[in-house]
Image (cartoon, helix red, strand yellow):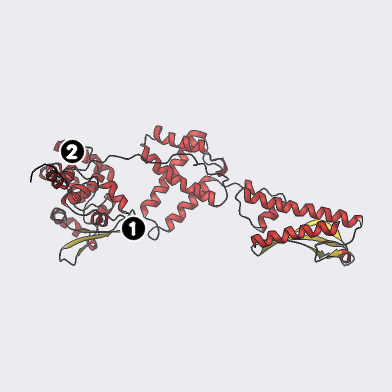
Amino acid sequence: MYGIHNAFNLFLLRKTVVMEQTFGLHFFLRKSRKKNNDESMIFIRITVDGVSREVSTKRKCMPQKWGASYGRLLGKTEEAKSINAYLDTYQQKIFEAKRKLLERDTELTAENIKAVMLGVDIYHQKHMLMDVFAQHNLQVKELVGKEFALATYIRFETTIQHTKKFLFWKYKIHDIDIRKINYELIAEFEFWFKSVRNTNHNTAMKYLGNFRKIINRCLKNGWLPKDPFIGFKMAKKEVERHPLNENELQKIIEKSFAVPRLDLVKDIFLFSCYTGLAYIDVKRLNDSDIVVGSDNCEWLITKRQKTNTSARIPLLPVAKDILNKYATFSKNNNGKVLLPALTNQKMNAYLKEIADNCGIQKRLTFHIARHTFATTITLSNGVPIETVSKMLGHKDIRTTQLYAKIIDKKIGDDMKWVRQKYSGSD
């Protein structure tokens, strides 16, 4: 009877090994170190992907009673039946430990199976959120200039500070066990951004997107049994941007300001309108970014800090005049800085004042300059969207399409021939 039962177990074991090619079990004897002790301890060797760990079964037998090829005691004595039944049960416990690891999406290793067999709670090892977050940010910082832009690191640092403030506001704690992060916490985090921080929907989603990257790291490491973001809607709302039209742009160009700070902000804003550069790229512009192109005209060729992609822009006369106006400033800084840009916050505050003085009803921010370049300066003048995408330094033309809301004048011009066709005139 035992022979048939043991043969069936061996068949199952061999079938498992053949199917997976990564998992194996083997019972064997290990001689005692005591010379006067003839009994040997029965061990089991667990092997996963060629890496083995050994566990004592706490059972012994005489070597001559052991069937090495079967991994069980020989014979039909009560001792053999008892120990073999125990080893069968022990083997099933190992299969059960393996099943639990797979079910909980925990890494299947010989070490983890051994740990479960020894009663070590590998599922409940603490991983604190702030430790994981800080380690992630440190790695991003080390890769700034290689894989990440400085702005990316700053964004994650801002997110971790927001997370700390939220945890204290909601739970009066400074850190939290990763396993306690659930859907409710994510939803409360969103509420905190929109109520306490008074951020708009898209900004809240931006920060939660950064937070989600930390959660994904925890999931990949097997520290979280379930993604707390499942069911949480992360879609951003489409924001209607209103670039300046030609008339509004001309109003700003022609407006004179007696206050130097407004005149400065006006110039730098217009420079962005005619180059499409984002604020941070204008601020870090230096003389090495101005080159003579194959057309013998001056080009602005620089790397965007946000995406580390190249932006290649022919220098239009308005932009060139602004650079010439601040040539002395650039010379005093050895060409390392071309324009004396203020902080983005101050620029936006003064742009509101400029809009009021020019009678422009639109909400004017520095980023509107980039949209103005994409629409009024380029697309409305027949520049193909592929060319605009290259000048803006976009990786994907779909990003350019978000900027490029074609204004009515361009649509009207494009439809003229269609209108003529269906006007009924010959």
Calculate the distance from the C-alpha at mark 2 to the C-alpha at mark 1: 32 Å
Q: Horizontal and vertical percent for residue 381?
A: 16, 51
What's under tag 2, amino acid-wise? Ala
Direction from residue 2 to residue 239 in the image, left or right: left
Q: Name the N-terminal-most of marks 2 and 1.
A: 1
Task: Classify the position of the N terminus by image quarter.
Answer: bottom right
Q: Is residue 126 visible?
A: yes
Q: Give how far across and how far down residue 191 sits, in percent.
A: 43, 34
The residue located at (46%, 48%) in the rendering is 213
| Left or right of 330 in this view: 10 | right
Density class for disc 2 (Cα within 10 Å; few <14, some 14-19, many ≥20) is some
Q: Quadrant of residue 365?
A: top left
Q: Which mark is residue 355?
A: 2
Q: Residue at x 79, y 52 (%)?
A: 89
Query: Against 40, is 410 above or below?
Result: above
List the residue tagged with mark 1.
Answer: 308
